[in-house]
Image (cartoon, rainbow, N blue to C red):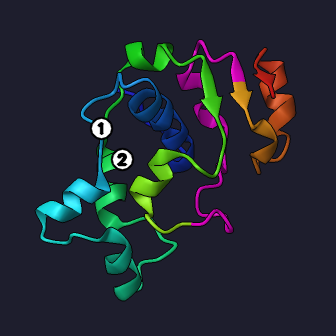
Amino acid sequence: MAVFADFNFKLLVVEKLMYDEGTLVPAFSIDARMAARGIPDPTSHVFENDLAYTVLDESRAFFEELEIGEELLASVDTLLVDGGLQVYYECSPVWDGEDDLFDVRSLDDLALLPNLREVIGAEELRVPGALERLAARGISVS
């Protein structure tokens, strides 16, 4: 199985496969996980326990341990970089996009996506030389 160097890059891939295409199953739901623990309102829980603007431990553990096979990785042809991704809610239910919590810090994981052809919102990547690196791999940006 693939090992990702950058957790936040992996989240972009998870968004595509789990929440956009529905091919990586079962989909993780922090609401369902918390409800199963008797916590009906994740937002209140997060604020009451000073967990706002962090990746919840339960979410981080799930996504870090999540294995994505080579066949699924090879199916990824487009990634979206956007502050409103579902996977970000699943990690941090009250995150507002105003900090660097989910900034991709490395593009080393591009090698795991042999058929990636486009990155939408690539200008939001905070990796030095990101646009040039994508272009050098023949990946279009928009």
Task: Give x and y (percent) for residue 117.
Answer: 69, 15
For mark 2, what is the residue?
63
The vertical placement of 113 against 20, above or below, is: above
Circle 1 or circle 2, nearest the eye: 1
- SS of the residue at dot 1? loop
Q: Position of residue 89 (x, y in %)?
A: 45, 56
Classify mark 1: residues with Cα within 10 Å, few (<14), some (14-19) or many (20+): some
* Apparent side of residue 86 relative to residue 136 in the rendered image (left or right): left
Q: Quadrant of residue 25?
A: top left
Residue at x 21%, y 69% (from the top left corner): 40
**Mark 2 and mark 1 in contact (Cβ < 8 Å)?**
no
Question: Is 117 one of the magenta-colored residues?
Answer: yes
Magenta stretch, overall SS: loop
Amino acid found under the numbered disc labelled 2: Phe
Q: Residue at x 29, y 45 (%)?
A: 28
Q: Amino acid at mark 1?
A: Ala
Q: Name the N-terminal-most of marks 1 and 2.
A: 1
**Quadrant of the image containing the C terminus:** top right
Check the image and report above or below for 60 versus 104. Answer: below
Q: Horizontal placement of 71 versus 29: left or right?
A: right
Seen as rendered, the residue at the extreme front is 40
Q: Provide residue 71's location: percent of width, then percent of height.
A: 39, 12
Residue at 82 percent of width and 41 percent of height: 123
* Among the 4 quarters of the image, the one containing residue 136: top right
Across the whole image, how many numbered discs are drawn on residues? 2
- Checking the image for residue 104, the label placed there is none
Q: Residue drawn at (47%, 77%), measured in percent from left and top? A: 52
Q: Which residue is mark 1?
A: 27
Density class for disc 2 (Cα within 10 Å; few <14, some 14-19, many ≥20) is some
**Magenta residue check for 78:** no
Q: Is residue 1 above or below residue 121?
A: above
**Boundaries of the magenta span:** 96-118
